[in-house]
Image (tube, rainbow, N blue to C red):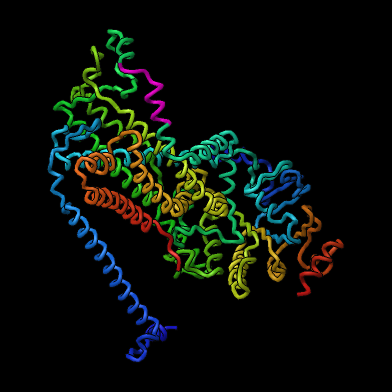
Amino acid sequence: MSEQQSELSAAKLAVSDHEMIRIAEMHKWYGQFHVLKNINLTVNKGERIVVCGPSGSGKSTLIRCINRLEEHQRGQIIVDGTELTGDLKHIEQIRREVGMVFQHFNLFPHLTVLENCTLAPIWVRKMPKAEAEDVARSYLERVKIPEQAEKYPGQLSGGQQQRVAIARSLCMNPAIMLFDEPTSALDPEMIKEVLDVMIELARDGMTMICVTHEMGFAKTVANRVIFMDGGEIIEENEPQEFFNNPQSERTREFLSQILLH
Amino acid sequence: MSNALQTPVAPPRNGFSLGKIWTDKRSRGVIIQIFATAAFFAFIFWLLRNAVANFETLGKPFGFDFLWQESNYDINQHLIEYDSRSSHFRAGVVGVLNTLLVAVCGIVLSTILGFILGVLRLSPNWLVNRLSYCYIEFVRNVPVLVHILLIHGILVHALPGVKAVLKGATDDASQQFFLTNRGFYVPRPIFESGIWLVVAAIIGGIAIAMWYRRQARIKQADTGEQSPVFWMSVLAILGLPIVAYFLAGQPIQWDAPVPGRFNFKGGMALKPEFLALWLALSLYTAAFIAENVRSGIEAVSQGQTEAAHALGLPRGRTMNLVIIPQALRVIIPPLTSQYLNITKNSSLAIAIGYMDIVATIGGITLNQTGREMECMIIVLSLYLMFSLTISLLMNWYNKRIALVER
């Protein structure tokens, strides 16, 4: 056991205990198009980070690089001590520890809500079915839809589907949660039910990175707000400072546009 | 909320009154249907009566008694005993079996080829997907009759004649396969008494594989451990019969074709007509099935793959657990059409003299007896029966895997 552990820690790179994600001098191109330029970002355990910026600024691409749904071409991404390279074993290992919630939910329509939640624990974590179902039910309870467990995704409302998607990610017991515009596809009255779940998650100490335009959410739960434009991180600050005293001209412009509404 | 559950509100029902019978949507629908049905059957009845009356004036009474007359013609490929003294009925049965043989073999081969081609078509490897693309575009844009004639032509004209093969054959007994333009001569299996052990082993192997699969599922549900179901099934289904074969003292003898003076003695021949029809239909239909498979897989949104990957599911599992179950729903309905097409296209057999149901009952029997009405009714209803059976099976399967919404 101890031998295994020492092997494991040897495999992990030398980072501080608190560091969950480190992105250093990272670049990404789509063909000739330079999407992400020299990204440097460190996320510590328990931090809640909100990423905002105009559309096309590379926010989604950035968080999709963290679980390798997108490949970066230069620089370094280290997640929980494991560096992301072409190594499939490492990629799968990181994906097990990083949960992701998508704008369009991406629930599996051919499986019930409960099966959506138990699929990965059973096939990836090799969890006994009864145990996986217990875990799933407890998370469905937490996102406040335990009574929908036997239904199919097509029978739920958008807000309910997004909460199932959050529960599905939590069932893998991830160390980090990534949210890619989780409320953008929802009707206004459903946004709150999803945000409430996310706020509760933040209070429980989950490490989170959220791409969102919900500035209220950013003010309530974020430790740090990151503003991106043109594939670069323009500004990075605590929410109080970020909203009251933005440093760059572009940030001010962006904030004036979205806060006027 | 609880109050609403106790007294459910029923959907409102409209009261019935005679005055509204024509303005009410539902009762008007019923009336129209009754009249339409009556008119349809009256039309069919008129058609049939007309036909029977006309045949009677021609002096051709309607009836199926001709089926028991001697057929007076030979059929080169018969799966059951048949010669020219057999009845027309028996010729028909031979034709039906030949149609079914080529249809079933065609469905199996075209499905396998189609799925492989469809998946290759989506390969990220440029060469592989281009090759698959070229195959599909070439094959499906040439009429199937041309494919049949082409392959038949190759088999008949490019392969050496029996005489030439016999001349070239040495006394070397090791040669057991002969390619000639009259057929592909191969050894014929002769089953001895010990064969029951092998048959039992095959059935047992399948049973064991199914049992193992069940046990593996139960074990996974209980402990989470996964078992190598695929490889254990292969071992049981292939391994067991092989062991049984040797235990029973090798109960299959092979009767190899031996070159004689004018022809081969023993063995059996796969006829060029069958080979040409089977290959042409399969290769042609496979191109269409490949496109169905490709569109089915592409119809599953990229988000599904991303969600599965984000949960840590590896590629293979993502395919088996997430993509394929959803793709099948898109693939099955057009696949049914392709199975129907291959069955019906097999009637092109007549172009190269493969004796299917159209060539026997609808061809020679019709010409000899002059019973065109009866023969066409038989052929029509047989094809209808095959097609409806396929439709029924596929629709049942499609329903079983359909998506639940609302």
Q: Is residue B397 above or below residue B245?
A: below
Query: Could you say which is closer to the camera, residue A36 or residue B291?
Result: B291
* Furthest residue in direction top, as rendered: B171
Q: Quadrant of residue B26?
A: bottom left
Residue drawn 44% across and 58% down?
A111
Where residue B284 appears, x then y in whole percent? 44, 39
Instruction: Classify residue A116 as left or right of residue B59.
Output: right
Query: Could you say which is closer to the camera, residue A13 or residue B272?
Result: B272
As for residue B161 lying within the magenta part, the answer is yes
Q: Which residues are magenta?
A: B150-162
| Quarter of the figure with the C terminus of chain A | bottom right
The mark total stands at 0
Q: Is residue A96 visible?
A: no
Q: Is residue B153 above or below residue A241?
A: above
- Dominant secondary structure of the magenta stretch? helix
Instruction: Classify residue B304 as left or right of residue B364.
Output: right
